[in-house]
Image (tube, helix red, strand yellow):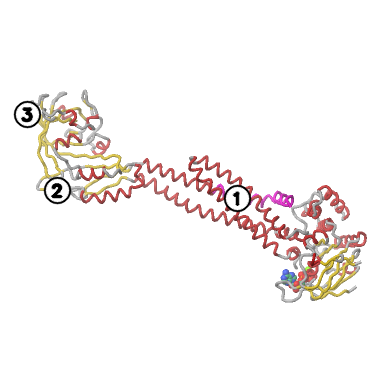
Amino acid sequence: MSILSVNNVSYRYKKGDRMALNGVTCEFEAGKVAAVVGPSGSGKTTLLSILAGLDRPSAGSVILNGADLSAKDLDQYRREDVSVIFQAFQLFPLLTVMENVCYPMELLGAAQKEAKAKAGELLRKVGIGEEKWKRYPANLSGGEQQRVAIARSMASGAQVLLADEPTGNLDGENSRNVVALLSRLAHEENYCVVIVTHDPAIADASDTVYRMADGVLTRER
Amino acid sequence: MGRYVLRHILRAPGKSLLCLVLAGAFMVGLMLIRVSTIRSENELEHLYTTTTVTAELIKNSLAPITRKGITYTGYVYPSIVDDLAGTGFLSHCYVEAATQADYLIRLDARGGVVDDRYTVGDVTLYGAEYSQEFQEHHADAGGEITYFDGWDESVFLQSWNDWQSEDTAKVYPAVVSQKLYETLQMEEGDLLRAGIAVDISGEPPKTTRVVTNLTVVGTHPGSFNMVLLPMESYREVAGTDPNYQRVILTIDPAKNHQLDEFRVRLSDLLPEGGVVPITAVYWDQELRQAIAPMEQGITLMKTLYPVTLALSLIVAAGISILLSLLSAKEAAILRVLGNSKARCRAILCLQNILPCFVGLVAGHLVAVVMAHVMLPTGDAAGLLLPALGRTGLYLISAVLGAAVASVAMTAKDPLELLQVKE
Ligand SMILES: Nc1ncnc2c1ncn2[C@@H]1O[C@H](COP(=O)(O)OP(=O)(O)OP(=O)(O)O)[C@@H](O)[C@H]1O
Ligand SMILES: [Mg+2]
């Protein structure tokens, strides 16, 4: 069942001379991993930022669970409904692992104790042992940092996980772990996972594959 | 939000301390400049009101003054001294007149000539106050006067008419040298008769010859031919106002600030002041030498103050902007996680302003205490409001800097800041 559908979305950057997205239409389903591939500069990240609620499309609409995003407060949408996972992890460097994962819950007004309990649960789920919870991100390996970032993305209870080149900074082993983790989250916990990637291996492992070229998106598989 | 901000302040102690220390240091530094300025001003004022400046009226030419074959010693008209005394600028005025006595004969207590042999010629009669000034200007004056019984230094200050009865021949007190006293083989109570020429005020100067009786009230250890008369007596002897040969004006220290005004007044009077052209020589090096560097220091501090103040405001804004820019990435993460732009701005601002604020409060307190410790209460009180103003300005500047930077930060597309660029 599709929870996020994009209907004929176009987008032009304020300083851009051409359309970064041109009539993009697609559907993302819960319990599935979707990959978006395409050459550099084709508009993948632009699509992601629209999906993440960081900008509104110039034309067209994005529908979340039947509700049009244009009617929604995007700040709230980002707090509650979507999460983004980055190539460079983007954890708060001055917060500990535990604090990083608690942050989205604190933002939603959760009590500290409950937030910690849930964060612990999530960290265990992504394979970060308790001995690392008090560390700062700089003291973790890249693979660990990315798993903490995935734990953080689940913390708010968002169902849609958007990842932009999540394995770009990782070696083969860690890449496979992260992809496996994201697949598991989709297939076992019903998350809707969208991965922007250059990596053919990720595309092969995905349930659906979209290809972006010059702002135009086509379904490949 | 509070917790996030607090953690970021405490866990980036370098940044926070920089903000805090800069704010505090500027407040203390600026106060230090103001306090030093006021202290210097007070010191200068003290110097002004305690340093004595004197001016001496001297003739322009060293040549002796002769008219029609007569040599005159006095050349400053008493009228200029009277005029100057009336200006209120002077705290003291030392005047001295002198004349040659043709002869000096010893008389007995009743006024009879004892013996013609007890005569000396070529004696100088001084009308002056026997003061430090007199001794400074007469190397041969030498030391203490030994007064005879019933006399003391007040003889130089009294008006002489008081004790003179109308009918008796006038006798004036005089101090002679110990050597002269011995040469004339005098005894206490003996009189002297002097034949003198007295310079008289006016143009052309005149000289009158008078004979007068002196009573010796004491002896001085100085040179043989120096005879001292109180000025008051000298005038009496001269019968009319004698010209002065030495005039030393002591400017009231309270009027030192108006020294230039006094100079103008005096130089206006000078052309009419003497028999020959006269000039005023000011002995004010002490004042000038001490004042010049202090005034320079004060000027420097008064220039330094606005410069430092401007610098502090630029630094306040600059540091705020710089540190906000350094937090750009975190601001982008905050945005992606669902914070509104306004909230991101508030977080960025608070993060930089709070340490600055703490530094300001601490710096302000130290500055106020410093002012109270280093300055008299009245002066310190006057610095409190400006100090508060500075603290406020610094805060406003820091807040403005942070606000501008945070607006600029949140205007950017967060993904652009967070994505890896190849
Ligand atoms: N802030 C911006 N202002 C103007 N143009 C932009 C901006 N960001 C991206 N673009 C342009 O929009 C187009 C799509 O960019 P986008 O970042 O979505 O590409 P991408 O597919 O993610 O590329 P990559 O694989 O290199 O990350 C490109 O031509 C890019 O130059
Ligand atoms: Mg991209």
> In the drawing, does residue B312 fall left or right of residue B178?
right
Question: In this orientation, does residue B59 appear?
Answer: yes
Which is nearer the eye, A60 or A36?
A60
Residue at image coords 50%, 41%? B374
Residue at image coords 72%, 74%? A16
Residue at image coords 70%, 72%? A15
Image x and y of residue B180, in percent: 16, 30
Farthest residue, direction right = A188
Which is nearer the eye, A135 or B210?
B210
Q: Which residues are magenta?
A: B1-29
The kind of residue tagged 3 is Asp
Question: In this orientation, does residue B228 appear?
Answer: no
Magenta: predominant secondary structure element?
helix
Reply yes or no: does residue A85 show up in magenta.
no
Quarter of the render that holds ligand 2:
bottom right
The reply to whether callout 2 and callout 3 are in contact (CB within 8 Å) is: no
The reply to whether callout 1 and callout 2 are in contact (CB within 8 Å) is: no
B336 shown above or below B86 = below
* Quadrant in the picture for residue A207: bottom right
The kind of residue tagged 1 is Ala
A84 shown above or below A218 = above
The chain under label 2 reads B
Which residue bears the numbered disc 2?
B203
The chain under label 3 reads B
Badge 2 crowding class, 10 Å Cα cut-off, few under 14, some 14 to 19, many 20 or more, is few
For the C terminus of chain A, give its image quadrant: bottom right
Which residue bears the numbered disc 3?
B116
* Quadrant in the picture for residue B56: top left
